[in-house]
Image (spheres, rainbow, N blue to C red):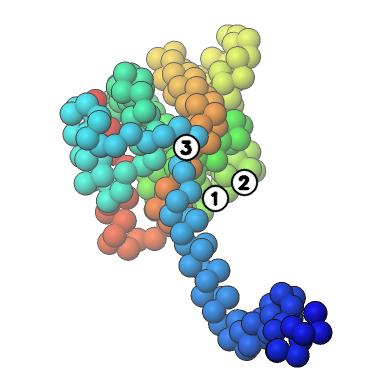
Amino acid sequence: MPVFRSLGVLRPVSLLCLVTNRFWKKLPVVTLNLRLYETQQEEKSKPISRYPIPYKKDLPFDIVELMEEIENKRGFLPNIFKMLSYRPLEFRAFFAYYNIIFNKETGQLSKADKELIIVVISLASRCPYSVVVHSAQYRVYSKNPVLSDQVCVNWRKSDLPAREKAMLEFALAISRADDITDDHFRKLEVHGFNREDAWDIATISAFSAMSNCLANFVSLVPNKEFYLMGRTSDVKDIKSDPAAPKV
């Protein structure tokens, strides 16, 4: 060892200290840029679901056609479409039923009412994806971002009218599989809802509860675009119109 020292050869630890000391002066700036870069890369590579997303070339034509239509209308493709494309038959069934109950033109439920039901059911189901997505769509249809935020915090203490609160109480009873009695229907009738409206509330509530379970199961991540949707009157919000897919 004395011979090595006399020749100027350093031990591994000394060499490491030398390199570190020489590099240290530049380290703060380099480290900051590197960490930001790594964060961006991690964000881009973060999966949107536990299950793989199929390549477009491997999907049936009708599903690709619908997905492209939705993306062109909105300016982005909601992740629910990507996730469900993993199982094409279930994709078609899911959106076919969604189309039937959401685009139904009869009855007294507006699209804002339907989105409101989905938001509250999703809150009870603790489903991050559905809360983010449907609170955004409720902002668009209601044109009331303040009320939407109130609902997401505590809908019972929000400024919602008594009609909407009665509708939500009934929807939650359905999602919890409560024993539905004539009293439930009477409370709806006080606010102008008939038996057909009750059926509509029930189907939206039940469908939402099912889709929340699925979204939670696959750890579905919401698109970032939904967070700002419907919060401004900017002209870009024209693309925010969340027209329900017609399958």
Q: Is residue 83 something that shows in the picture?
A: yes
Identify residue for label 1: 149
User: Label 2, label 3: how many angstroms apart (C-alpha)?
Assistant: 26 Å
Q: Residue furthest right?
A: 2
Q: Position of residue 111 (x, y in %)?
A: 36, 35
Instruction: Say whether marks 2 and 1 touch (CB < 8 Å).
Output: yes
Q: What's under tag 3, amino acid-wise?
A: Ser
User: Badge 1: how crowded within 10 Å, few (<14), some, or many (20+)?
Assistant: some
Instruction: Please tell me which of labels 1 and 3 falls first in the chain.
Output: 3
Identify residue for label 2: 153
Q: Position of residue 201 (x, y in %)?
A: 46, 22
Identify residue for label 3: 49
Q: Residue furthest front?
A: 3
In the image, is 155 to the left or to the right of 101? right
Tell me the quarter of the image containing the N terminus. bottom right
Pick whichever, 121 or 28, lies toward us. Answer: 28
